[in-house]
Image (tube, rainbow, N blue to C red):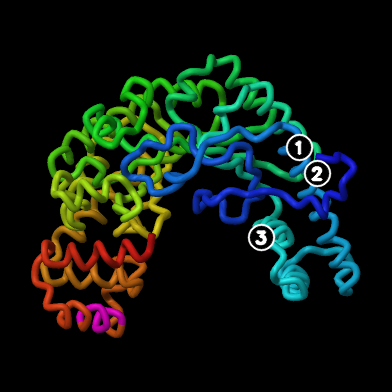
Amino acid sequence: MNESMDPLLHGFEQGPIRPPSEAFSLLLRVTRNCPWNRCQFCPVYKEEKFSRRDVKEVLADINSMAAWHEELKSRSRRTGFGGSLDRISLQTIYQQDPGNPFLYSLVLFELGGGRTAFLQDADSLFIKSEELVEILKHLREKFPGIERVTSYARSRTIAGKNIEELKTIRSAGLNRLHIGMESGSDQVLELVKKGATRTEVIEAGIKAKQAGFELSEYVMPGLGGKKLSQDHAEKTADALNRINPDFIRLRSLAVSPRSPLYQSLIDKKFEPLNDLEGVEEIRLFISLLDDISSNFVSDHMLNLLPELEGKFPGDKERLLSICDRFLSLPQKEQLIYIIGRRAGIFESLDDMGAPEQKNRAQAIMERLELQTPEQAQEVIRKIVENFI
């Protein structure tokens, strides 16, 4: 690459995914795809080969992002906004060049306040620690207003680094880690070929906390299917009690036709939970979380009960009561809510009190002649498949 190339012409590369909480973050691609790429539930990257990006390429991308950031300010001045980057000026600037992906990335970044960045793809800490430190320092130098830098990381990768390495990376500017624990059960982890053991999951979480990272652990309700549901709930809660992460984030299982697990579902080797059973599993899981101070987050469209949000230990009983509220509904009311939620009619259980919304959901249920959770499951699976 010619290092004298105009950074605006060079542009920058971005990967396909990021967490919902990073919707307005600056997305910096450090690696391509996933170094493991065997998780049975995951449809992402399956046809793609993993590669580490050359450090010079990543540094050039940061330079290009900074140049586009300055270009954003220049366009603000040229369009009469004096260099300000508020919502109105950003919308005006983007409308003048709506097909520009680089401009769009920086507009999103500023709409979110210009304070966060996310390192892509699936496991940025897989690269050499000294290279990651160099990237982080350059990012912080070019964007001094950034307050938080986050990355996905695999449990096995974190467990394989010593605590001093992790502290050095933290000091260089990586604040938060998102780890896809999924489960604390060895049986479940083996079933879905997660590529980490329960011991590694716990070790990685504890190391991340000791190194000073803000830690999000992702949990996947339903991942053990009917057979391993109880073990999944019990062992996952126990692992999290040992780690005490800053965030516990629910990502309910949805089996994509593009994932390896889909064939097991079709062959009936994997029997998924229906939504009623899923809430029962989540309730058991929450009931077993003790002596932690984690924030509990349900920030994904696939979660049936998005209102399951709070902070331990104070909100534990309230979270359990939300589960109980759903579980105590008559079966018909449960089905109305399930269909309404999956069809995008309801955003929470409280919406059941809105007659117009409830009537719409009930009309769908009656048109499909759904009377039991088992009958609803196939319809719901197709709705969820379309979503993912």
Any mark on residue 174, and which?
none
Type of amino acid at the residue the image marks with label 2:
Asn
- Using the rendered view, name the quadrant where residue 110 is placed: bottom right
Residue at the disc numbered 1: 59
The mark closer to the camera, 3 or 1, is: 1
Name the quadrant containing residue 372.
bottom left
Amino acid type assigned to the residue bearing label 3 in the image: Leu
- Alpha-carbon span between mark 2 and mark 3: 18 Å
Residues in magenta, as a range: 357-362
Residue at 42% x, 44% y: name it.
46
Say if mark 2 contacts mark 1, CB within 8 Å.
yes
Circle 2: element type: helix
Residue 360 in the image: x percent, y percent?
27, 82
Residue 236 position in % (x across, y down): 28, 33
Q: Where in the figure is residue 379, as x and y percent of width and height?
A: 21, 68
What distance separates the C-alpha of mark 3 from that of mark 1?
21 Å
Residue nearer the viewer, 274 or 334: 274
Front in this rendered view, residue 56 or 292? 56
Left or right: residue 152 compared with residue 171: left
Taking the spot 24% from the left edge, 46% from the top edge, the residue there is 222
Determine the secondary structure under disc 3: helix
- Tell me if 19 is positioned left or right of 355 in this view: right
The amino acid type found where label 1 is placed reads: Leu
Residue at 20% x, 46% y is: 264
Above or below, 137 against 85 in this view is above
Above/below status of 128 relative to 361:
above
